[in-house]
Every structure is written in C-alpha cells, then in structure tokens.
Image (spheres, rainbow, N blue to C red):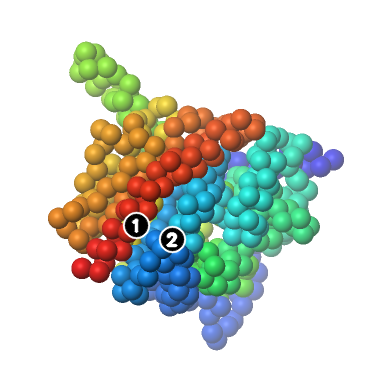
Amino acid sequence: MKKLILLFWLIFLPLEAKINRQGPVPQKKTPTATVRNETGLSIEELKALENRFWHAHESLEMYLGAPVALNNMPLIGMAVSGGGFRATVAALGLLKGLEKIGLLDSTSYFSTLSGSTWLGASWLTQQKSLTDLEVYLRNKMHAALSINNIDEESIAHKIWHKVLAGRSVCANDIYGGVLGNVFLDRYDGNHGQKTFLADLEEIATSGNYPLPIFTAALGQTDPYEWAEFTPFDIGSDYLHAWIKPEAFGKKFKNGESFDKRSPEDLAYLLGLFGSAYALSCDDIMKQMVNYITHTFKPNQTKETRNLLTNLVLAFTDMQRVSPPNIYNFSYKLQNSPLASHKHISFIDAGLAINLPVPPLLRRGLNVYIICDASADGIFPKGSELKKVAEYAKKHDMPFPEIDFETISKKPVSIFYDATNLGVPTVIYIPNFVEISTLDFDYDEKEFSDVLNGIEDAIMTYQYAIKDAIQRAADVRDL
C-alpha cells in the first residue's frame, strides 16, 4: 500500500498539481512577517559572527601555536561546490581534513551549494561528531534513493497536509522529502520531514559551528543572481529583500505578509538547493555548447563547431521544467528588480557558478578555503574557479590572480598577492575522483575514494596551509 501511495505522487506531482481554495481573508491589524528592505547582513548574523569570533580566535592561537592580536584575526570561510553525492562526500572530507590539522574551529563561515548543502544541513541537524556523521552517511548513501529505503508514508503524509491546506505542491515536495529521509533523519519519528531552517538558529548563534550559508539562484534573472539561506534570514542583495526563515513561503505585498501559513521545511529546501532537475532547455543547451567547446580538438574546423553550436542554441526558448515556485517576498517593493513578479523560482545555484564563493565575497573574508567537487570528466578542473575570478572582477571585489594551468595538477593550490595586502588568500582543493553527478548509490569504495582524496590532500599540504594562514594573520598586522 505504501508503494502505491508513493507511485501516485511520483506520477502526478512532477506535472505540478495545484489546489487553490478560496476562503475568507483574515483581517489582521499587524502583519505576521515583514521584509528587511535593504542590503547588508542582519543583526542576528552579526551577533552570531561575534560569538564565533571568540571561539575561532582561541582556536587559531592553538593552531598557530602563538598569540594572535584581536585586530589581526583573519576571517576564514569555507566554500564547497555542488556535484550531487560527490559534493556531499567531498564536503565531509574537507571538514574532516581541516579538523585533523586543527584548522576547522578557526573558520567562521561554511558556504555550500546543491549537494554540499545536504552535508551542511545534516551536520548541523544531526550534531554528530564528524566521525559519527561519516558512519551515518555511509549507511544512508548506499542505495539511498532505492524505493526500499524511502519512507514514502512520511513524505505522502506531509504532502497530503499541504494539499488539505490549499497549498501548491510540485515535484520538489517528493525530491526534497526523499533528501530529508537521507540527510535529516534523526531517529525521532519525523524521518527528516519536520525540521526547519529556523531550528538551526540556536546552534548557529552558539559560536560552536561556522555560520552556514546555503545557496540558490533566482530563476527569473539573466545572468543568474544569488539567493542566500541562513538560519537568520533568507533573501538576496539583488532583490534588496530579506525575510526570516519562518516566513519563507508566505504571501507578501509591499513588504508585509498577513499569511498564517507555515514555512516550507528544511527537506523542501534541500530539494530546492539541489534542483538541477529544474534546468530550463536554455540551461541544457548552454551546457551542451560548453561541452562542444571543451570537447572539440583544435584541428577540427571552426565551421563544424559553429554549426553544432547554432543547432543547440536553436532550442533556447523552451521553458524550465517544474522549478520550485515561491511567493515573491519582494513583490511590489519599489527597489526590487522583480517587484512585478508574484512568484519567483529558486534553482540550483550551480547554474550560475558551481562554487558558492560570491556570498562570501560580499562578506569580505581574508581567507577562502575552496573545495571544488564540480569536475566529473566533462569540464576541466578550475573552470568554475575561473568564473569566480570573473565575478569578483566584475563586481570590483579583491581576488588574487589564479594560475589556471597548474591547479588541475595539484591536490592543493594557494594564491595570494604579495604586493597588495588587501587581496585575500585562496586555498583551492579540487576533487580528482570523477564519479557522475547522477550516481546516487555510493558503495564503500566510492565513498572512501572521494572522502579520502580531499582529506589526504589537506593532510599532505597541512604545512603549506598553515603557512598561508600565518601569512594572512601577519598581513592583518601590517
């Protein structure tokens, strides 16, 4: 019977079922949620960052084995690419490697995208040691999406309650529900379906963990603009609009909401963060053009390349496939570029840049530790980092010159500008284990290969990394 229930949803929801019910409009004198109509960081994040600062400072002194003046303390952040389960495991390898060399507790931010968001959410939700989290994920990620390992009853129950409440449901309700089963199941009976982003605020404010930033892209923008999801707020500087996580999914107009509906849960957000399935045909064709560019050899004629490219681009006006559509919280706000849109779609940020560095760039970090699990044998290593460098240049943000000829050959590359003290340090760690992004069944060897590849690279280059961190602290002293 359970399998029949899931089969029903799998057949009908990808086509996007919507039930709209008309009822009396509640009259409230005060809104249930408001928009922070500005750019910049929230007071809550600044407070959490301050709490993390003291923890990170103490840790950095232990790591360097010497006192660090408070005004010399470098702000260190981690960024991990998307790439499905490959990115999930690579993110765990990064955390374990940095923990082993004693640097993890000195970091202040953990920015993730698509598959790495699943690891970040699981880490903070489970609150396990990284060793215990590894055991948990090894068990969960073997045949994770097999119908025999999916608690379809908990997913169907949650979706049915959305239907009864007159809420819209779509493919992401199933996809996110399954991801909740895998990454958020805390053995407390909810099977990952009753956890919310706001539930992470207390732990993020405690100072015991780096502040998490989950990312997505705004589907209505070209080029794609970034959206950020933290336990403190959700929004985008592009929209000039930020809301509390508990307001995500409510109806807004002119910066206010009188809607009593509950927010979308964290499982739904995990699906949204990794919604590569919501590719538009334009996205697909652009990826194919990139593939053609990187695949064709120099001796092949320019005419042949142009012919295939034009054939691909001929289909770019086709529509996106069932993206997660959310009520636009910047609706009717005068300074929002999307003020006329009642709904906005959030899609996998990897369609913009498959490295979630831009949210860190706007926070002005001193050290960026970048783990790139995006390469899977199709595109060359470093291609996403090149996009980051171009983004920084376009937005007039300091970023060091990158030697793109060498980064694909070294387990760890470190870049800084010896002549400009205002330029941050970049520590780049690529993944060399090329497993398809579409592989959702990791055996012991595949899991270990990706995990150990990143972890061992950090251990091997630990002294070079330490020298880079010491230099960043010394630069702050000048």
Residue 22 falls in image quadrant? bottom right
In the displayed structure, would residue 336 be above or below residue 402?
Answer: below
Residue 189 pos. (x, y %): 78, 57
The residue that disc 1 covers is: 469
**Residue at 55% in and 86% down:** 29
The residue that disc 2 covers is: 63
Q: As drawn, is 134 to the left or to the right of 109?
A: right
In the displayed structure, would residue 29 be above or below residue 206?
Answer: below
Q: Is residue 46 visible?
A: yes
Q: Amino acid at mark 2?
A: Tyr
Q: Which mark is residue 458?
A: none
Residue 222 pos. (x, y %): 32, 48
Q: Is residue 273 visible?
A: no
Q: As drawn, is 104 to the left or to the right of 412?
A: right
Q: Residue 170 versus residue 397: which sits nearer the camera?
A: 397
Q: Amino acid at mark 1?
A: Ile
Residue 215 pos. (x, y %): 45, 54
**Residue at 41% in and 63% down:** 65
In the displayed structure, would residue 224 be above or below residue 326?
Answer: above
Considering every residue shown, the one lying at the far left of the view is 419
